[in-house]
Image (tube, grey):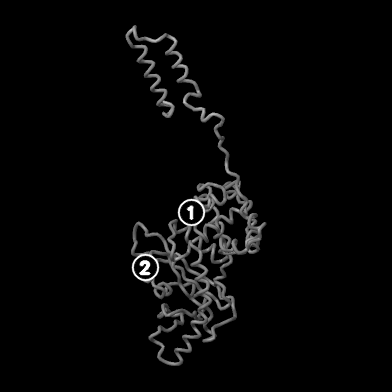
Amino acid sequence: MARLATSTKRFLCLLLMTTLIFQPPLLLLPPYCGMEIHRKVYHPTFGRGKGAPGFSRRKYARKCCLDVYNYFKERNNDRIFESHTRMYIDEFEVLIKDLKYLRSNEKLSKVGIKLSFEDKILLVFFWIVKYLDYALISHIFSTTPAVVTSLLETILPLLVEHFVKFIPNAINSELTSKLSSKIVAIIDSTIHATKKPSKNQHLHYNENYKRHGMMTTLLLNFDHYISCFVTGGLGRMHDAAAAKHMNCFIKILKGRYALGDPGYEGVPYVVSGFKSNQLISNERIKFDRVSRSEQIAIEHVNNFIKSCRVLSKRHQFIHSRDKHIACVYSLWVV
């Protein structure tokens, strides 16, 4: 009986007491026996258990939140910090200064009360770069998965509002391509893998990459800075088919051109490269060599994107599309 639940014990004791009362007179126990059982059943400590001799029950204590940011800062380990955030410690400090106006944000101050402001921002970038499970990231910051969920829902829109101001939507560079002075930008697309949607799966499946995903097209100037990008595209769309409808790129280029790979053949504002079977003359071979060397810059940007798990083409993003787009803004502009 010691291992049974308290409610079960009370039921059995009351059943025993009733049985004793209605038995034949010769089998009845002393009158005080039933009252003793009744008293024990309704005692507040009934069924609690005393545990092993010499040990007392531990009292529940809330976790003390670790100061993760200061942990990295005191050790001044840039290499490990950069591997988790894609920023060095001094770069993160500059970001914190830029975001100081969010310290007084009423909604943010009510979430994760025991976490410092620096750790709240750091938690978001930990999640973006490593795409950790909520249980694991809550263990790192000594909080709960519910707090992690609330922080991401609160901070991501605020980061988008902040970083969108740094997207110029213009070609702010005087450098041009070696091929022509009218080629002022480089264009490329990449896919971010997502889970298979519950409906319209064919619209999100990309035959080239053999996975469901969201497409992002990037326009880079020859100073290697992002001039503009379009994200949230369906994975089914081909690079050239999607680029033909990107009016923002046409507006930014103002009659000039962008350099792209052979996948952009047929796009009016893109000078596309040649496929291997089209290199049939010395002029084309020379053009191909120069165009490929100039496109290395945008390949470095794509490599940086793919190194972050939320935007990788190898790791499926299982959260909402709004969060996925917010991660694009939060990561690329940084």
- SS at mark 2 in the image: loop
Element on which disc 1 rests:
loop
Residue 249, position in %: x, y? 49, 74
Q: Disc 2 residue type?
A: Lys
- Label 2, label 1: how many angstroms apart (C-alpha)? 25 Å
At 48% across and 58% down in the image, what residue appears? 323
Q: Residue at x 48, y 23 (%)?
A: 46
Query: Quadrant where the N terminus lies?
Result: top left
> 65 or 124: nearer the eye?
65
Q: Residue 208 sits in which quadrant?
A: bottom left
Name above or below for residue 214 compared with residue 59. Answer: below
**Left or right side of 236 for 100:** right
Quadrant hosting residue 171:
bottom right
Measured as percent of width and height from the top left, residue 67 is found at 63, 51
Most foreground residue, 26 or 212: 26
On-image quarter of the C terminus: bottom right
Q: Position of residue 296 (x, y in %)?
A: 51, 78
Circle 2 Cα neighbour tier, 10 Å, few/some/many (<14 / 14–19 / ≥20): few
Give the label on residue 133, or none.
Answer: 1
User: Which of the labelled discs sits on residue 201, or is there none?
Assistant: none
Nearer the observer: mark 2 or 1; the answer is 1
Which residue is the extreme one toward the right?
A: 74
Which amino acid, by three-letter code, is at mark 1? Asp
State the mark number for residue 210: 2
Q: Quadrant of residue 273?
A: bottom left
Residue 191 on image: x %, y %: 44, 68
Q: What's the residue at 34%, 7% (across, down)?
A: 26
Which comes sooner in the sequence, label 2 or label 1?
Answer: 1
